[in-house]
Image (cartoon, helix red, strand yellow):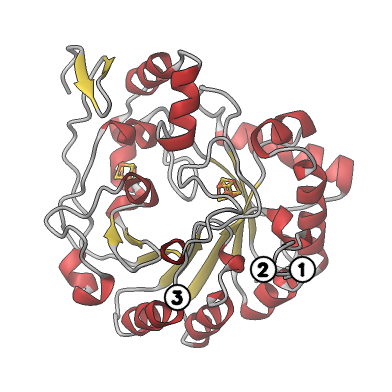
Amino acid sequence: MTTASLPILDGAPFKARFETPLRAAARITTLQINIGYVCNLACNHCHVESSPARTAPADNMDQATARRVVDWALGQDEIQTADFTGGSPEMNPNFRWMVEAFSGHGLHVIDRFNPTIIGYTDRRSGAGYGWVPEFLAAQGVEVVASLPCYLKDNVEKQRGRGSYDASVEGLRRLNAVGYGRDPQLVLNLVYNPVGPQLPPPQETLAGEYRRELQARFGIVFNELWTITNMPIKRWRRQLQREGRLEGYMNTLIDAYNPATIEGLMCRHQINIDPLGRLYDCDFNQALGLHVSGRASAYIWEVSASDLAHRAIATDDHCYGCTAGCGSSCSGALV
Ligand code: SF4
Ligand code: SF4
């Protein structure tokens, strides 16, 4: 790494450019599917800028693409996990049959969502999502539910008024069908900082979440994962407006930890957007940073083994993954 002040991304001067060369591992075992950007919330840190307004056709995976994605994954021996993200994945009409197809063929399925979706009713379509807990439990899906804090004020600062009570109710519904209680029904929670700081130690915070959620609401869960806010998109613009972007970037750069490199999620997965195009991770997808040498390639144009050992496309946002204990879609790395 250099330590000179260099211009990056949008010309802001930070202490160092991210120059760690990254390569994918020998086996790509996870297909992460960003099935659509539509969400019932519009959080201020959302790296894909999801909201209820993301309803353009290109923002949501259509049925033909979904079929090609399922066929591709089921045809690759290496792929063991289908990891759904969004947006709120449940808002895509193809979500349920895709999950059934994957779990029916023995793949491990993960659904990343915000728990408020369970009590949400779409005002335009009238669609409700009360089916989500029972459906996920019946398919044995691992649930990763975001809850930025166990305190109401902090949650509502990021997610808007009413989001805390709706989250609590959603988690209760998940517990009621066995999530967090039945060893087969895993419920992990995700924390991210409210402000431009690194997350606190994961184990310590997990203990606080466990104690507070149990005492206040009787809610139980398996693990808490801490995730660093990435300095991109909506969150980056907010930091810029507040004059805090350079300070945040330098916090990430100063905390660079080479021990995080081995576990970086981009090294073990391939990520696709709603059109089926390839990215190393969801953050690169949000930035339009395609897999090196495969600009605009679609998942069905490659095999999982083609993606092994590939050079990962990096830029300075990668400091968000390598700071401190590291950050990935399954929390801290070291
Ligand atoms: S709930 Fe998740 S996907 Fe939806 S706006 Fe918030 S951060 Fe984005
Ligand atoms: S943002 Fe993180 S996961 Fe994505 S390419 Fe950079 S280091 Fe890898």
Looking at the rendered structure, the secondary structure element under dot 2 is loop
Q: Is residue 125 left or right of residue 307?
A: right
Q: Nearer the viewer, mark 3 or mark 2?
A: 3
Q: Earlier in the sequence, mark 1 or mark 2?
A: 1
- Quarter of the rendering occupied by the N terminus: top left
- Residue 52: x and y in percent read 61, 54
- Quarter of the rendering occupied by the C terminus: top left
Say which of 58 and 207 sits in front: 58
**Relative to 263, does residue 324 appear above or below in the rendering?**
above
Q: Which mark is residue 62?
A: 3
Q: Earlier in the sequence, mark 3 or mark 2?
A: 3
- Residue 273: x and y in percent read 37, 61
Q: Are marks 1 and 2 in contact (CB under 8 Å)?
A: yes
- Classed neighbour count for the residue bearing mark 1: other residues with Cα under 10 Å, few (<14), some (14–19), many (≥20): some
Q: Residue at x 43, y 45 (%)?
A: 328
Judging by the rendered image, the residue that carries numbered circle 2 is 185
Residue 13, by quadrant, is: top left
Q: Residue at x 47, y 40 (%)?
A: 332
Confirm if mark 2 falls within 8 A of ligand 1. Answer: no
Judging by the rendered image, the residue that carries numbered circle 1 is 178
Looking at the rendered structure, the secondary structure element under dot 1 is loop
